[in-house]
Each structure stands twice: as structure tokens, then as C-alpha cells.
Image (tube, rainbow, N blue to C red):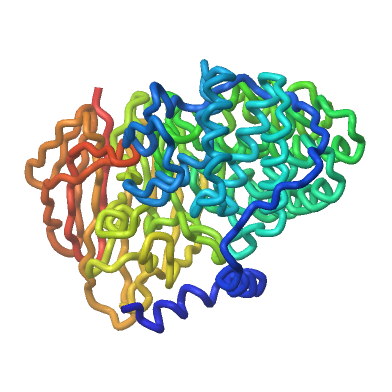
Amino acid sequence: MMRPGLVWRTIRHLTGRQLVYQLLNRLRPRPRLQLPQVVPDTRFLTIAPPDKPHSWEASTFTFLNEPVPMPVVDWNYAGHGKLWTYNLNYFDFLNQPRMSLKEGLGLIGQFMARSDTLRDGLEPYPTSLRLINWIQFLSRHQHRDDAINRHLYAQAQLLSRRLEYHLAGNHLLENGFALLTAALYFRQDYWLGRAVALVRTELNRQILDDGGHDERSPMYHQLLLDRLLDVVLALKHETWPDATSHLPFLGKQASLMMAWLEGVTFRNGDVPMVNDAVWGVAPTTSQLRDKARGILMSLTDETLRGQRRRYERGALLHGVTTTGYQMIRRPRYELLADVGAVGPDHQPGHAHADTFSFVLYVDNQPVLVDSGTSTYQAGLRRMWERGTAAHNTVDVMDIHSSEVWAGFRVGRRARVAVTASTSSTLAATHDGYRRLGVTHARTWETGSTQIRVTDQLTTRQGGDKTGVARLHFHSSLPVTIVGNCIRAGSVVIECTSPVTTPVLYLTTYELAEGFNRRRTAPCVAITFARTLETCITLTV
């Protein structure tokens, strides 16, 4: 049974608009499509080449690494949870390479024949992605079909009445992109006005000053940037003045997002799997870089040119950024530290309790990693992956630094104060353990081949407080402990404390390598009192 205090600590951060729409959303009847009697005119859009992952082949759908044969598609299939059903209803497979017109139309036809029986498939989020995918598919093949267009129009009408103001975040932004795409396809002035207002408002709200998305997930950042680039590409080839007047603003936002993504991408092309981020879901930074170069380079606004120069140089994140991620690059290593909020207060659904965690790559290979995300299904695994013990930081008394619960909820949130940020030193404190009377401070001091991490637990009443620091190593590394030293490949880590001798314990954890895909990897847990100094040295 849910505790009233926990619920209050969660909902107290919602905006007034969210609260109103949470109530309205619960009172609404089941969504239904109302097909128009007159087939609306359509105009094909300019779109990018098909690049979605292969998820349909020989009548088998594969989502979340779970294949399901479906000669006749069951659009309500729930055997692998709601996210699998959502993916089925997104229709991303229409825009995978080598999807033929005949095959795609056959799948669309099956969906249309069963649309009056749909449950999850008519919710706003899958409807948004499906609208974009159908329009891109039809535009690519220059195919007009009155029945499909009637159905598309009805879906867009339904979406326009059910925008996800109750959730906000990436869902609401995807709603806006979809309605804007439908407005261009059907030349609907009313939809265009609503969509542009929504997209502009949400981009201004959700894209922070450093260019990062406020939910602080590199994966969702990549997905939203990809969607924004598609919109910019379509607008660049538009002749509709009401639509093209917004191109400079959207192009600027895309350039900001690209610069941030370059800043958090490791030299080998990986992005950190922080917060809810999953391998193999979003386009890579390299793919987005190529796509952005082709779409944004012809824009002439000086601000855009400045942002393009930043990401062409491989923009580094200097100083503390708005998202709270700081990338420290040296010739032999890259370290990304998290000294920011877990997410926006009103929508931390994809947040993990990972304050002060960090990721370390040495010689372009992962050494210390985020344990990642393998499921969105509420349960023990989801709770562990979101919890503090799954990250390279310190927990106290097995309590999460931020109060994650259920699948996408957060009660208390750790509040961070950065106390130093220079080219060689980053220091911050957080109060995620304030209910225990404990403050956690962490300092990273970085040299050319050595990193010193210092953790300090301070109590209100004085005295020592015991904490556990964890280091999650990549599965490719053999890890051994001798005394207070850890050896992992070309890295030696020494753990010391001026108070008591730290206790090191070698264990294992399950490293997420995608949805429903995990690999056993080594983890070292370090129990200490008050202060811990962790010295990471790179050997030859």
C-alpha cells in the first residue's frame, strides 16, 4: 500500500496544469477515432532516408530484444508489457531500410482494420510517433491513399484533443512534433498554430541553457534531436510562409542540442547510459552528426554558425553545465561526472538516484560505467537500476539519495550545491541524506594520469557515519583486490581513509546491454567511515 507521505512528496512538485490535466485524463472516455467524410488534401514532405532499426522481418516483430511472430498482427499484444505494445504501435518499422511499399501498406491496412479494438495504441504518445512514421512512409513512396489519409486525419484530430499536458516532458514535445508534421501534410492552419506554439514553448522549457534536455537522459536527447531535425528538414523545403517563419528558431534549438550531445559523447562514439538510457534505441551521435550537418549547414543565422563550430570541434563541457554533467577530457581518459539535479522537478520519471556518480573511459575503452537500464517494468530490477547502489557513488544505510519508487516516480530529491569547478577540480555537496542528518560531499581532482576522488560524510550531531561507495566496472575487465588496492586492466585504484581502514569487497552485478539483455560484471563495494580517498592511477 502506498504511503501518504511518499505520495505527497511526489505530487507536490507537479505544476498546476499537470494536476488539472491528471484529473481530466482520468475522467476522459476511451479514445475513439472519428473518420472524416471528406478526404482531406495532402502534400508530401521532404524526409530523411529510412534509418530506423530493423524490428520487423518475415512476419516477426522484435522490440526490447523480444521477438514475437505475428502473421496476423495483434495490436493489443501485451505478453511483454506495455512498452513492447507501445513499440508495436509506433510503426517505426515502416521506416527501416528495405521496407517495401507493399509490405508497409499491408501492415497499415491490418492496423486500420482493427483500430476500433485498440487500447494502448490510441494513447497520445504512440499515436504521435505513428503519425510521423505513416507520413514519412507515404512521403518517401509518394503514395496517396484516400482510406489511409482519412485514418491519418482522424488520428491527428484525436491527438489534438488529448495532448499530454498531464505528463509534460518528452511526451508533450513528441505530441507537438507530430501535430506539426500532420499540419504540414494536411495544410491545416489551426493545427499549425497549436503545434508551433506548443513546440516553441516546450523547446524553450525543456532544452536547458547548455543545450541538454531537462530529463537528463542522453538517449531521450538523441531521440528528440532526431525528431527535431526531421521537422527542420521538412520546413526547409516548405513554401508555406506561416510554417517556414519558425525555421530559424527550430534550427537554433537543433544546433544547441547537437553541441550538447557532442559534449557528452566519448571519443569512441559512446554516450553515457545515465538515467533512463538504453543501448540500441536511439540514433548514435555519429548518425545525428551526419544528419545535422546536411540539414543545418545551409542555415545562415550567425548564432547557428557559432553552435555548429562548437560541435564540429567536438565541443567540451567546460565548467558546470545546466544539466549538471561535466565532461573532463585528458589525452588518455575521459570522465563524466554528475553534479546536477536528478531531473526537472515536475517530471523526473526517467531519473535515477545517481547524484555524484561518474563514468570513466580510459584509452577509449569503458572502465567505470553506469549499470544502465534493462526494463521499464515496475519491480525489483527496475528499482535496483534506478537506485543509488547501482551507480558509482555513495549510499548511506542502504537509502537512495533520491526517493525513487514505482516505475517512474520520485519523492524526495537530492539538492546539489557546486562548491568548486576549475580545469582540474570539481567539488559539490548534496543533501539527499538529510533525513539521516548526513551531507555528502565529493571532490574530483584530475591530473594527466591520475584521478583522486574524495568523499566526505558530515553529520549534524558530529561523529562518524558509515557509507558504502561502489565502483561498477565494465564486463570486459578482470578485477582483483589486494589489500586496499584494486587492479582493473591498465587502472590501479587505491582506497584509503584517515579515520578507519576501508573494507573492500569484490562482488558482481548485472550490466544492462539493452532492454532485457544483461551481462555479469564486477563491482567493488567500499565501506568507510566519514572520509574516503579513492586514487585512480593509469598505468602503461
Q: Nearer the viewer, residue 259 or 280?
A: 280
| Vertical order, 270 against 128 (above or below) | above
The residue at the far left in this view is 482
Res. 410 image quadrant: bottom left
Count how many numbered circles sit on residues in the image. Answer: 0
Q: Position of residue 537 (x, y in %)?
A: 26, 35
- Image point 62% across, 72% down: which residue? 24
311 relative to 201 in the view: left or right = left
Q: Which quadrant of the figure contains the C terminus?
A: top left
| Vertical order, 67 against 393 (above or below) | above
- Image point 75% across, 39% down: which residue? 250
Residue 167 visible in this rendered orientation of the protein:
yes
506 relative to 24 in the view: left or right = left
Residue 274 visible in this rendered orientation of the protein:
no
388 relative to 508 in the view: left or right = right
Res. 101 image quadrant: top right
Q: Position of residue 296 (x, y in %)?
A: 73, 26
Q: Position of residue 74 (x, y in %)?
A: 42, 42
- Image point 56% across, 36% down: which residue? 261
Q: Nearer the viewer, residue 455 or 150?
A: 150
Q: Nearer the viewer, residue 521 or 90?
A: 90
- Image point 28% across, 59% down: which residue? 379
306 relative to 393 in the view: left or right = right
The residue at the far right in this view is 241
Q: Which quadrant of the figure contains the N terminus?
A: bottom left
Q: Position of residue 193 (x, y in %)?
A: 84, 50
